[in-house]
Amino acid sequence: MDLTFKKIYTYTIFLLSKKDYSPQSLRKKILEKFPEAENQIINNVVDTLKKEKFLNEFRTAHNYFTSKMEKGWGKRKIRYSLRQKGFSEEVIKELETSIEFDYSFIKREIEKKFGQVKDKKLREKAKRFLLQRGFSYCEIENIL
């Protein structure tokens, strides 16, 4: 094993002990710390971490998805954010089919923020709020 491989591997284990990363964001972190590192070594480290199950893209994306769902984010916003973080399209599609989206979190937040949405102006405000959170029009009608 190369000395730089060991250094990078040790550093990534340290990072992964604190937080889960997508493979793409982990590569960025490695390049921040070791700008001289070769792509081949970085790819070898990431592949080794996947084989040893330290780096699991589906688990990381699942945890991210559920945490954002609990914060009141909509499917579209979560999907966009997962793409931005570098998760593969297959993982995102698999998540959407495997996780049943729970609207109870956003319903509680709407009631807390707007109360009973009966007034037309208040209803429009709630719709804009939900659109910013990444909900589709069909989902918004179901929620309200």
Image (tube, rainbow, N blue to C red):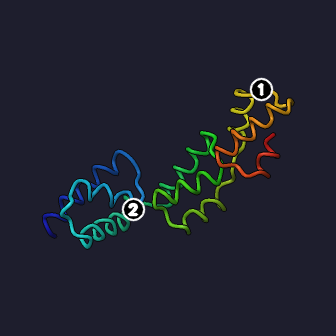
Q: Is residue 137 above or below residue 53?
A: above
Question: Mark 1: which amino acid?
Answer: Gly
Please give the name of the residue rendered at 77% of the width and 26% of the height, measured from the top-left corner: 115
Q: Position of residue 82 (x, y in %)?
A: 52, 56
Q: Is residue 72 left or right of residue 47?
A: right
Pointer 2: what residue? 24
For numbered disc 1, what is the local secondary structure?
Answer: loop
For numbered disc 2, what is the local secondary structure?
Answer: helix
Mark linked to residue 84: none
Query: Pointer 2 and pointer 1: residues touching (CB < 8 Å)?
Result: no
Q: Is residue 25 left or right of residue 98?
A: left
Count of labels shown?
Answer: 2
Question: Mark 2: which amino acid?
Answer: Gln
Determine the image quadrant of residue 80. Answer: bottom right
Q: Nearer the viewer, residue 11 or 89?
A: 89
Q: Nearer the viewer, residue 123 or 107?
A: 123
Q: Is residue 28 left or right of residue 70?
A: left
View extreme (left): residue: 3
Q: CA distance from mark 2 to mark 1?
A: 41 Å
Q: Is residue 35 above or below residue 66?
A: below
Q: Position of residue 34 (x, y in %)?
A: 20, 58
Pointer 1: what residue? 115
- Give the position of the N terminus as an image quadrant: bottom left
Query: Label 1 neighbourhood size at 10 Å, few (<14), some (14-19), many (20+)?
Result: few
Q: Is residue 130 above or below residue 54?
A: above
Q: Nearer the viewer, residue 1 or 121?
A: 121
